[in-house]
Image: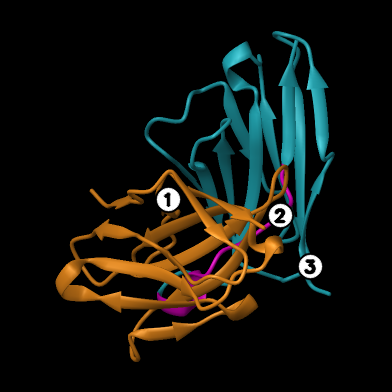
Amino acid sequence: AQSVTQPDIHITVSEGASLELRCNYSYGATPYLFWYVQSPGQGLQLLLKYFSGDTLVQGIKGFEAEFKRSQSSFNLRKPSVHWSDAAEYFCAVTGGGADGLTFGKGTHLIIQP
Amino acid sequence: DAMVIQNPRYQVTQFGKPVTLSCSQTLNHNVMYWYQQKSSQAPKLLFHYYDKDFNNEADTPDNFQSRRPNTSFCFLDIRSPGLGDAAMYLCATSRDRGGHTNTQYFGPGTRLTVL
């Protein structure tokens, strides 16, 4: 069965500092990987996705993620965070069919002034 | 803008009183999903429709049902809500299945409170 691990439940970063959120996945075949962001009381917004090809993918709001098959990882990065980036971040995996997404438990990002 | 819409955004019901949540989409996507997200947890898939074909997750309680009368609309029915069903319910759509067409787009969610 597929699974996603986000090792960090909470991360605190100073505004303007760089950010990396970790995600490890377990999937038997070629995974399709996603990062979503969720503000309090809101739905999920897609930040970026990886299906194939270039292992470094660019997303919205200045985020990027790198797929490393050898490490089964898909870490999310941003060079300089803004206070508006404070939210919950979910990494998710699915296969090639109409399967639902399997999510990690999320990482809560706190931005300090 | 094309989007996924959920109504209502907040729903309060009484223990055991049936409730229906609504999702509509202007994306003309073939697949519609319902997820349950309890407080401080990850979303969990309940079921999905691929066109008119209903696909239930094995561990979704019988208390949860769904209807998709047309491409644009999908409903989540909770026949007898219990206190444990209080959660955010998220609707998502994807254009199709397979590869990049399986990118899922989410609505804003409906927060269900059970008294």
Q: Picture quarter containing residue A112?
A: bottom right
Q: Amino acid at mark 1?
A: Phe
Instruction: Say which residue label 1 marks.
Output: A103
Give the chain letter at badge 1: A
Check the rendered structure and report the hue given to chain A. Answer: orange
Q: Amino acid at mark 3?
A: Thr
Looking at this rendering, what residue extends furthest in the left direction?
A: A70
The mark that comes first in sequence, 3 or 2, is 3
- Of residues A24 and B62, the one drawn nearer to the viewer in this rendering: A24
What segment is highlighted magenta in the picture? B99-109
Residue A41 image position (x, y, % from top left): 72, 42
**Is disc 3 surrounded by few (<14), some (14 to 19) or many (20+) residues within 10 Å?**
few
**Under tag 2, what secondary structure?**
loop
- Of residues B64 and A103, the one drawn nearer to the viewer in this rendering: A103
Instruction: Say which residue label 2 marks.
Output: B107
Give the chain letter at badge 3: B
Instruction: Say which residue label 3 marks.
Output: B26
Position of the C terminus of chain A, as image quadrant, is bottom right
For the point 35% across and 78% down, the residue is A66
Q: Amino acid at mark 2?
A: Gly
